């Protein structure tokens, strides 16, 4: 028959040498021989793998000896650790909710702004361009005060499409009468460009350069 106390002594020695596997096996033998061995249960609570197993070992001790201070202290540590872990999880959950809410709000604001651009700004710009095209003079005079002061001609530009205007396509002197062909809004520069033609030169100029 297994001697509970002898198995307990061997288990403690194995654990102190760092061999917890052997210590756990010997403690199991000690407890099999004497299920009410308090010291065996206390040592077993130190070598099992999970807090749930530790809690069970310590509760066995308190069931045998309710006033055991070592078991009460270790059980309190386990409960405090579990409470801290739960609180940490709750804080992280709240943080995730806040972050998710902020992201959702940002997406909603972005969609609202996009809808506003599509439903208000773009149609408004298109409508203004159409009104300008309808009411634009068939002819106009080129004049740019800044260029005129420096003695430079008005440069015409090529249209790259989608409201972008690129390289020079020609030049005309100030005061030149030109035929107005088209209006186009430039989202990049936030202004209107006008396509004009005169003397074989054709290109786009800023709307502010036209004088009726």
Image (cartoon, rainbow, N blue to C red):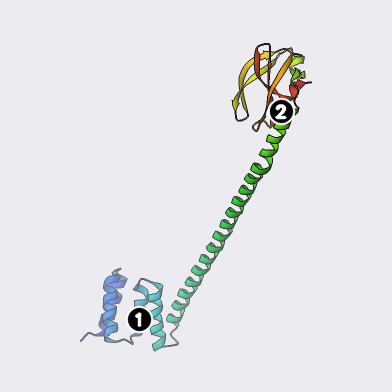
User: Disc 2 designates what residue?
Assistant: 133
Return the x and y of residue 186 as percentages of the image width and height: 66, 30
Number of numbered markers: 2
Instruction: Looking at the image, tell me whether mark 1 or mark 2 is earlier in sequence order.
Output: 1
Q: Residue at x 45, y 87 (%)?
A: 67
Q: Residue 125 is drawn in which quadrant?
A: top right
Above or below, comparing residue 191 to residue 70 in the picture: above
CA separation in Å, label 1 and label 2: 94 Å
Nearest the viewer among 162 and 42 is 162
Q: Which residue is mark 1?
A: 41
* In the displayed structure image, the side of residue 47 where residue 131 appears, left or right: right
Q: Please provide percent x and percent y for residue 49.
A: 35, 71
Point out the frontmost of discs 1 and 2: 2
Which quarter of the image is occupied by the N terminus?
bottom left
Q: Is residue 98 above or below residue 114?
A: below
For this orientation, the residue located farthest to the right is 212
Residue at disc 2, secondary structure: helix
């Amino acid at each position: 028959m297994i001697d509970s106390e002898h198995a307990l002594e061997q288990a403690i020695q194995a654990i102190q040498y760092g061999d917890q596997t052997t210590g756990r096996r010997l403690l199991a033998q000690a407890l099999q021989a004497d299920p009410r061995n308090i010291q065996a249960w206390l040592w077993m609570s130190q070598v099992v793998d999970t807090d749930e197993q530790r809690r069970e070992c310590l509760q066995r001790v308190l069931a045998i000896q309710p006033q055991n201070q070592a078991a009460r202290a270790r059980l309190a540590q386990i409960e405090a650790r579990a409470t801290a872990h739960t609180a940490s999880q709750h804080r992280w959950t709240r943080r995730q909710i806040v972050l998710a809410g902020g992201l959702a709000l940002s997406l909603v604001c972005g969609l609202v702004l996009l809808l506003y651009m599509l439903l208000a700004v773009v149609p408004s710009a298109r409508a203004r361009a159409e009104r300008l095209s309808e009411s634009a003079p068939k002819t106009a005079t080129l004049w740019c005060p800044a260029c005129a002061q420096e003695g430079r001609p008005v440069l015409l530009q090529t249209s790259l499409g989608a409201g972008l205007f690129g390289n020079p396509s020609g030049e005309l002197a100030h005061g030149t009468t030109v035929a107005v062909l088209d209006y186009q809004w430039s989202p990049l520069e936030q202004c209107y460009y006008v396509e004009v033609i005169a003397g074989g030169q054709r290109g786009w100029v800023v709307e502010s350069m036209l004088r009726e």
